[in-house]
Image (tube, rainbow, N blue to C red):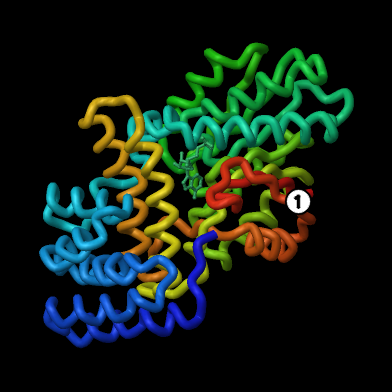
Amino acid sequence: MFFLHGTEIEQLTKIKKAIFNNMPFDDLEIICKEVSISLNDKGFAYTYAACLLASEDKISDAKKMFAINGEDTFCKIMYDYLEETNSFDLADQVFKSADPYNIYTQTDFFKKHQGGALKYIRKFAQESAPPKSVSPVTILDIGVGNGMFITKIVNEIIPLYDIKNIRLIIIDQSEDMLRMAKEYCEENINITVEVISICCKIQEITKEQIEIIQNTKPIWFINTGLSIHYMPKEKKIPMLKQLKAFSPKLVLTEVNWNHDLPESNSPELFYSVAKSYGVFSESILHLNVSEERRKLCLNNFPIAEAINIIKQNRDNRIDYHTTIEEWRKIAAAAGFKTSEAEATYTYDNKPFAFVMEMY
Ligand SMILES: C[S@@+](CC[C@H](N)C(=O)[O-])C[C@H]1O[C@@H](n2cnc3c(N)ncnc32)[C@H](O)[C@@H]1O
């Protein structure tokens, strides 16, 4: 949802050239000042330079640049991170442990976004009844996380059809998340639940794992909550084709960000990263938790993701969030139709996060 105009991109490219030509810091600052005049978001000239410097491991210059635009949330958190760690490396593997994610689920952003998604899914479930006379009813959840979201969904929709027992197939690439989700679902779902856990990256699901899922068909629907953006467009299409073979209906809950198609080091990519993670991190900064917990969440979730996108070439990014328009194209290429996207969280009157149905 954060895009630059063509002329802004042209101007910002001057900064990239200057950095790749090893221009001294003081001269670079002058270029940034000149470029900033032609930008809507003036400070982004410094953010862009800081990100490029950081990705070249010029930590001290990157810090100075982030400090110049220190009013900006993204620059502030990145400055603090560099000050603390003196490196532009990931704190740890994102989602290796469930703890940072559990802290994030207390944010206003998450609660509002999840509330909106839940309302949408209730309406979706009302209009799309489960397959008739099938017991138990089966739902497949991809990237289940800590299990809280799918638990809320199930508890919200079972009264619609007086469902007495349910089978949940939960998939996640993290053993820790999967273990926690299984326990959480078993303890908190209001009816009898059978949980089948499958540990894999969904784009790398094995034949044996596919067979386990096929044997549970028909599957009412597939839920994907912020969980299928971890691969580039080329892999999203076959992955969605596979999901379509499991169930004709899928609910996609995602952020409307632009981190898939833009080239590495491009102004478009870094603009989307800085603005999106800035807004996202605001909600973590406002959390009523200890400084230690806040840092744990920031360093291991938004900052780790942002560093990865900034530093890696496109093939090696972990996150490939993409826009509503792109999801529509990807869905169509995989044989799905899409509903209107509904915003679950807006920023500047535009969808920052959204939910949509594929069918
Ligand atoms: C942002 S969390 C979302 C959790 C939950 N669905 C929710 O909405 O609260 C993303 C989850 O997807 C998992 N994940 C990441 N890449 C994945 C992949 N390629 N395949 C399956 N799960 C993945 C992560 O381990 C994490 O638990």
Q: How many marks?
A: 1
Q: Is residue 80 above or below residue 170?
A: below
Q: Residue at x 36, y 68 (%)?
A: 42
Nearer-the-camera pick, 45 or 125: 45
Question: Which picture quadrant has residue 119?
Answer: top right
Q: Where residue 270 sits in the image (x, y, percent)? A: 38, 66
The amino acid marked with disc number 1 is: Glu
Nearer-the-camera pick, 205 or 114: 114
Which residue carries the number 1 mark? 340
Question: Which picture quadrant has residue 326?
Answer: bottom right
Q: SS at mark 1?
A: loop
- Quadrant containing the N terminus is bottom right
Left or right: residue 174 compared with residue 119: left
Q: Is residue 307 above or below residue 214?
A: below
**Label 1 environment density (alpha carbons within 10 Å; few <14, some 14–19, many ≥20):** few
Question: Which picture quadrant has residue 89?
Answer: bottom left
Q: Where residue 252 sits in the image (x, y, percent)? A: 65, 46
Q: Residue at x 60, y 30 (%)?
A: 115
Left or right: residue 3 compared with residue 243: left
Left or right: residue 24 compared with residue 310: left
Nearer-the-camera pick, 304 or 3: 3
Q: Residue furthest right?
A: 132
Q: Residue at x 20, y 65 (%)?
A: 65
Q: Is residue 352 above or below residue 25?
A: above
Q: Does ligand 1 reach within 8 Å of label 1's beta carbon?
A: no
Confirm whether residue 228 shows in the render: no
Confirm whether residue 306 shows in the render: yes
Q: Where residue 151 sits in the image (x, y, percent)? A: 59, 23
Q: Residue at x 54, y 52 (%)?
A: 348
Q: Is residue 358 above or below residue 144?
A: below
